[in-house]
Image (cartoon, rainbow, N blue to C red):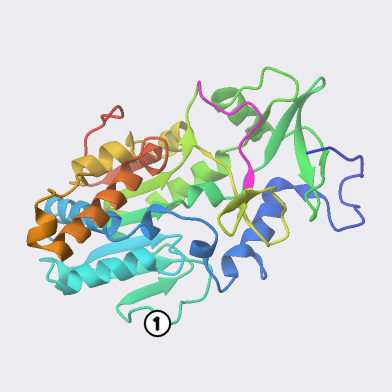
Amino acid sequence: MAFVTSPAGTDDDGPVRSWREAMNDALYGERGFYRRPDGPAAHFRTSAHTGSLFAAAVVELLGRVDRELGHPAQLDLVDVGAGHGELLSCVTEQAADGLPFAPRLRLTGVEVAARPAGLPAAIGWTEQVPPVTGLLLANEWLDVVPVDVVELTVAGPRTVLVDPTGRESLGGVPSAPELAWLARWWPLTCVGNRAEIGSTRDAAWAGAVSQVRRGLAFAVDYGHSAGERPAYGSLVGYRSGVAVPPVPDGSCDLTAHVALDSCLAAAPGLLTTQRAALTQLGVRAVRPPQELAGRDPAAYLAGLRDAGEAAELLDPAGLGGFGWLLHGVGMAVPLGSDRAT
């Protein structure tokens, strides 16, 4: 994206601000993208939108947490960045089918948007992460925590500024804490290289984890670790399922890959892949036997559907390559760490 030379704060089309400030307003402001009535599912697809298998895996993980905690009187499942409550609604359906901990289960969606119409009454809805005894899930939430963007110039790192139309310019030197984060987690070595400062994500993740009194917090997101950072950053927009230029006007999602190793340091635990984690939770992409088609066509079609859904969730080049950050409070993480699975 070409730079302009408008002085900071005086662009004809609106204020020129840091990307973090612009993202915050564009995503969460009064007319922000995440307050729109159509919801995130109208613009991008997450694991929670693939069907029932992801919810079943979350239920399996929740059962393991319940056993580790000794079956507490109240078992929480808190979904941070809940969208329109798709995941929690699916868990509600599964609980109605007879989960052993269903009578003790409390479901809560955390989202800036108003409570969706038609959401099951058993699901709570709030803008703030409540205290948790059980399982806290943040599925593709950290990637939309606003970040500052920095570019390396011949004079050193400079903060990238942006106006509401997406036009960029170079601002001043990043703050001392931002420079320290860069030096540790994302050193820039070539003029023109960019980084997204992940300290806001670190603080957001540590803050969410701090609300877990006993139990497990896990975040699912696409990201990177040291040695595999994108040279020019990863900030992009999404609208109606298509990647578009990042314009901070509230018309599109604004997202950037997460520095997962930095978040892990903020709340130490386990970093694995979705493929590895879901495989351990029983998700398998196995086609049903052909003979089932003649004996029970409905079961055969259901098996094909589940196999396709599992393949999407486990695809190492897609959702299966997402990182899982897990942090136990008063319990061990009930998954292994094999990232190569």
- Residue found at the far front of this picture: 294
The quarter of the displayed image where residue 102 is located: bottom left
- 106 to the left or right of 241: left
Q: Residues within 10 Å of mark 1 (few under 14, many from 20)?
A: few
Above or below, 225 relative to 35? above
Residue 150 location (% of width, % of height) = 70, 34
Viewport quadrant of the N terminus:
top right
Seen from the viewer's position, the closer of residues 192 and 259 is 192
Q: How many marks?
A: 1
- 67 to the left or right of 141: left
Residue 315 location (% of width, % of height) = 35, 39
Magenta stretch bounds? 227-236
Above or below, 191 relative to 139? above
Residue tagged 1 = 118
Residue occupying image coordinates x 13% and y 49%: 290
The quarter of the displayed image where residue 164 is located: bottom right
- Looking at the rendered structure, the kind of residue marked 1 is Gly
Residue occupying image coordinates x 33% and y 55%: 136
Viewport quadrant of the C terminus:
top left
- What secondary structure is found at the residue carrying circle 1? loop
Tell me if I can see residue 70 in this picture: no
Residue occupying image coordinates x 92% and y 44%: 6
Main secondary structure along the magenta-highlighted residues: loop
- Residue found at the far left of this picture: 295
Tell me if I can see residue 95 in this picture: yes
Residue 265 location (% of width, % of height) = 43, 33
Residue 249 location (% of width, % of height) = 73, 60
